[in-house]
Image (cartoon, rainbow, N blue to C red):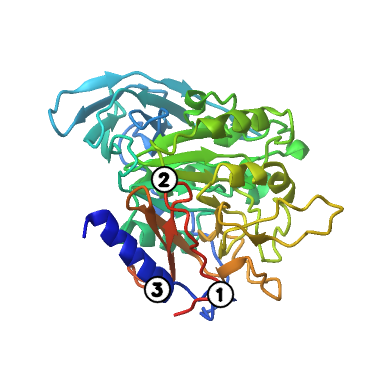
């Protein structure tokens, strides 16, 4: 038996006997306690030593195909250099890339000097070291580029959303970092620092969040999605430009996919084509986001990148009483496209809990025909809400009852997820709650690719 055939057989067996508690709310009971933000003096927020030392270092993919990396950081004492020195583990020849520096003001806050430098033409599947802060206090980090794009290239993504900077946030990030199945790249579904929850949208909390997450995002790229807590629209204090702190601090390669805005874009990585959408930008017919997505979906080459993944912030299918129906208008606009182009999975945040749906669609509903119940549809994506990073607002514990048939598994716990692509036909997905051991999968299921192996992978009526 070949490798592919063996994986097929294994996946079919697992799909029958060891999927999660299908179609029911989890019976897991956690100790309910108030979510508390870490004090500003916590070690995770510490400023690196040295004059003008780079801080809040973070990286994300810098082009369409994974051969570029955007390196970003902040200096506080003076602008310093925006150059990045880098070299591969293979040959050690050092090169330098030049970048740009930006600043911004928000109410009574003045940002540090924010640097963004894009490294291009990197070799695939190679470890690179890089240094920032040239000329002052230099700090060194590393990252690994993805394998060359191909249909059977294995690759592992981590999923985190709505992180914040509470003690629970720290547990989530630590769990992810220490997991034996840690991703090679994080797909982040929005709501980063929650600075807007503080008086006058205290932008110091953007700085602390950047230092808190540096331990992960300086070493592996996080793919950014803008959430509602990135809007920072506060006309009462004179701030009327949406997304100002976020767009200055977190750059993405949107122009590489012919997008006209950093809030919606796409990248290819290994065997996945990832589309990022903005729940808080115009998305109606004729809008720039609508026209871009209309042109983007036909470009997806499933022979090159079999796995089609969509990221957004506000979920379309949500059986909690929090943010209920907020994603409905976007669903009405785009769901038929997702079914037509056989999107494999949609990850969202916003609801501070965990939920995984069946493959369902509601595209038959046209307001007057009464067909308002989602139906099983094997061409539709699985919808996963992963807004359970651990922020100050706490868990969404109030669920709608009865649980709708489209909801395969739901639980109000903090955690993270892993999407592990094996080849063009199979990917293993798992969710880890913070209360469990590092290797414990509180929910897990095999995904069968909608283009290459579109067999029924329902789990609603199968239990442990």
Q: Is 455 located above or below residue 147 in the figure? A: below
Q: Residue furthest left?
A: 91
Q: Depth check: give the residue in front, 168 or 199.
A: 168
Q: Real-space Cα distance between discs 1 and 2? A: 26 Å
Q: Residue at x 71, y 42 (%)?
A: 333
Residue 49 falls in image quadrant = top left
What percent of the width, then of the height, locates residue 403?
66, 73
Question: Label 3: how many residues lie within 10 Å, few (<14), some (14-19) or many (20+)?
Answer: few
Name the residue beneath numbered marker 2. 211
Q: Depth check: give the residue in front, 378 or 82.
A: 378
Answer yes or no: do the residues labelled 3 and 2 have beta carbons within 8 Å?
no
What secondary structure is marked by label 2? helix
* Position of the N terminus by quadrant: bottom left
Tell me if residue 431 can be seen.
no
Name the residue beneath numbered marker 3. 436
Name the residue beneath numbered marker 1. 33
Left-right relation of 52 to 377:
left
Q: Residue furthest front?
A: 1
What percent of the width, then of the height, locates residue 418?
40, 57
Q: Residue at x 58, y 71 (%)?
A: 34
Q: Nearer the viewer, mark 3 or mark 1?
A: 3
* Position of the C terminus by quadrant: bottom left
Answer yes or no: do the residues labelled 3 and 1 have beta carbons within 8 Å?
no
Question: Label 2: how many residues lie within 10 Å, few (<14), some (14-19) or many (20+)?
Answer: many
Residue 35 falls in image quadrant = bottom right
What secondary structure is marked by label 1? loop
């Amino acid at each position: 038996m070949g490798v592919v055939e063996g994986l097929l057989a294994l996946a079919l067996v697992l799909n029958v006997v060891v999927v999660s508690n299908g179609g029911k709310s989890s019976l897991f009971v956690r100790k309910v306690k108030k979510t508390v933000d870490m004090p500003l003096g916590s070690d995770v927020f510490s400023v690196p030593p040295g004059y003008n030392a780079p801080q809040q270092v973070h990286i994300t993919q810098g082009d369409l195909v994974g051969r570029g990396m955007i390196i970003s950081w902040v200096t506080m004492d003076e602008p310093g250099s925006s150059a990045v020195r880098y070299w591969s583990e293979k040959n050690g020849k050092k090169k330098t890339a030049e970048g740009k520096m930006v600043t911004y003001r928000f109410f009574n806050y003045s940002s540090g000097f924010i640097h963004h430098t894009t490294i291009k033409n990197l070799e695939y599947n190679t470890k690179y070291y890089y240094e920032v802060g040239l000329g002052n206090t230099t700090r060194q980090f590393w990252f690994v580029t993805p394998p060359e794009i191909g249909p059977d290239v294995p690759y592992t993504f981590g999923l985190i959303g709505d992180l914040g900077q509470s003690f629970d946030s720290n547990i989530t990030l630590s769990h992810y970092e220490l997991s034996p199945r840690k991703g090679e790249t994080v797909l982040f579904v929005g709501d980063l620092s929650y600075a807007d929850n503080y008086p006058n949208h205290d932008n110091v909390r953007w700085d602390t969040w950047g230092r808190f997450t540096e331990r992960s995002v300086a070493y592996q790229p996080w793919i950014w999605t803008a959430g509602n807590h990135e809007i920072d629209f506060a006309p009462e204090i004179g701030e009327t430009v949406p997304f100002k702190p976020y767009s200055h601090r977190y750059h993405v390669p949107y122009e590489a996919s012919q997008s006209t805005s950093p809030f919606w874009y796409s990248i290819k990585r290994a065997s996945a084509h990832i589309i990022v959408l903005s729940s808080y930008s115009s998305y109606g017919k004729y809008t720039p986001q609508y026209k871009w997505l209309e042109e983007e979906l036909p470009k997806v080459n499933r022979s090159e990148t079999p796995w089609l993944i969509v990221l957004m912030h506000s979920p379309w299918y949500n059986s909690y009483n929090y943010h209920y129906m907020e994603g409905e208008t976007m669903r009405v606009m785009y769901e038929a496209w997702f079914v037509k182009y056989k999107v494999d999975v949609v990850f969202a945040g916003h609801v501070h809990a965990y939920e995984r749906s069946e493959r369902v669609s509601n595209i038959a509903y046209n307001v007057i025909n009464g067909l308002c119940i989602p139906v099983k549809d094997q061409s539709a994506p699985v919808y996963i809400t992963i807004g359970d990073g651990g922020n100050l607002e706490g868990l969404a514990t109030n669920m709608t009852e009865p649980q709708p048939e489209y909801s395969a598994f739901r639980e109000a716990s903090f955690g993270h997820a892993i999407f592990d692509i094996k080849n063009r036909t199979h990917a293993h997905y798992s969710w880890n709650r913070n209360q469990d051991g590092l290797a414990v999968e509180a929910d897990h299921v095999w995904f069968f690719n909608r283009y290459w192996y579109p067999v029924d992978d329902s789990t609603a009526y199968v239990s442990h």
